[in-house]
Image: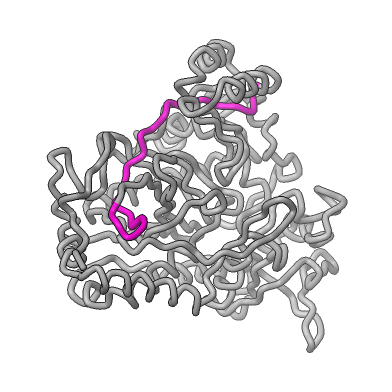
Amino acid sequence: MPKISWEKYEAKKVFDEYVGENQKLRPETKTISNFISKYSRKKLLTTIKNSENAISQRGVTFRVYSNDKITDHYWPLDIIPRIIKKKDWNKISKGLAQRVRTLNFFIHDVYNDQKIFKDKIIPKNIILNSGNFRKECIGIKPPFNVWANICGSDLVRDINGEFLVLEDNLRVPSGVSYMLENRTVMKSVFPEIFEKHKISPVDEYCSKLYSCMRSLSKNKSNPKLAILTPGVFNSAYFEHVFLAQQMGVELVEGSDLFVEDNKVFMKTVYGKEQLHTLYRRIDDLFLDPKVFNKSSLIGVPGIFNAWKKGNISILNAPGSGVADDKVVYSYVPKMIKFYLNEEPIINQVETYLCHEKKQMDYVIQNIAKLVVKPANESGGYGILIGPRASKKELDECVKKIKKNPRNYIGQKVVSLSTSPTLINNELDPRHVDLRPFIISGSNQYVTQGGLTRVALKKGSLIVNSSQGGGSKDTWILDN
């Protein structure tokens, strides 16, 4: 059986993670490429099978909703890792820390002093009209003035190889369990590489999250911590269970909790037990039916006031999604200058705001060349990629923009970088992005790498697992 040939691998007209313009392997990728090139095709197929078996045995799944049906799928992992040089990652890590620090300053400012409006950096009505602004949070000061304790920022690499921030996820960012499981599986199928090479670890994430949760509690000696899940039918339920098990904290549903004297208690076989810190994996609007959505059956009545009075810490804090808005995203460079008096370490994608007449006109006139996104959707839903859209789809998008300009942005198409991916047991370039995770509390922590998501469909730019995407382990490598 012939071996996998890197000579046959041909990068397209974008930045490729493994191959340069001259079709030669990049220095940082030679470790893995040389290693795999020695594999016979039979051994490679066995390795792929071993990785699939490990995922199956560990029960690593995700859920997809389609036609009112819920189906579980095993997590798709491509065994060719994404490799980033340590010195490049050091810059990215500093840039992410700077960005999230700024976003937390911004959220705290919005709900308190509102200096950014007074200095006319951002129009006030843009924020007050955001679907994620919670007027109920005005005047609240969470521990360390940090609202978004966990952030997952999506990075892409442009045609020049520069990392850009595509969006920030500050409401209920998901995917970190898959980052950790990918590493566990890769260590099991490539133990020799991990023994011989310095690949930055990712397994300290759960201990960092646990420390953050403890630091938010007023009870310093024996705080009770828990994760709030919407339940078994949620698409990220695997992750909720995983994190609770790894940290040794309780996994609870809304019905397991109740509020008494503005304190939150958990029902146990031994009676009630006060809860001090809650990592909630449900949206603001479903958190407390007394304050937000009155029909919510998955929240905890009265928990908002308990949080407001400081009797429980919630991460991410209610209201933190005000910064998780693609319109707000466009102002982040100005925020960094405003709050930190610094220049952004990481750049972001040029964005056109449809609520501004001139920019809306530009987006409509050039819609066939742009990517158009709704301000508050996630998971890749609602996105229109102009160059690949039909005339009907373009016309429908224009109508939506005109009807609700505040809800749409336009961006130039970023030629996402590609990485070699095993498709039908042959190497083929596929587009990738990267989601690192940043924890903020008394200290800040940035993962060494993150979840690389890969568009498994040829030519596709949609990397979300719910829409057919896969994943790769991300190696920060000392060369």
Q: Is residue 132 toward the left or the right of residue 332 in the image?
A: right
Image quadrant where residue 99 sits: top left
Q: In the image, is residue 105 above or below residue 411?
A: below
Residue 324, position as x, y percentages in the image: 57, 41
Residue sitting at 55 percent across and 11 percent down?
361
Is residue 332 visible in the rendered structure shown here?
A: yes
Tell me the quadrant of the picture where the C terminus can be found.
bottom left
Residue sitting at 58 percent across and 22 percent down?
394
Residue 338, position as x, y percentages in the image: 45, 32
Q: Is residue 98 toward the left or the right of residue 384 in the image?
A: left
Residue 310 is a magenta residue: no
Q: From this viewpoint, which residue is outermost toward the front? A: 1
Q: Which residues are magenta?
A: 405-427
Image quadrant where residue 85 sits: bottom left
Q: From this viewpoint, which residue is outermost toward the bottom? A: 270
Residue 302, position as x, y percentages in the image: 83, 59
Query: Front-most of 371 and 406?
Result: 371
Q: Is residue 343 toward the left or the right of residue 207 in the image?
A: left
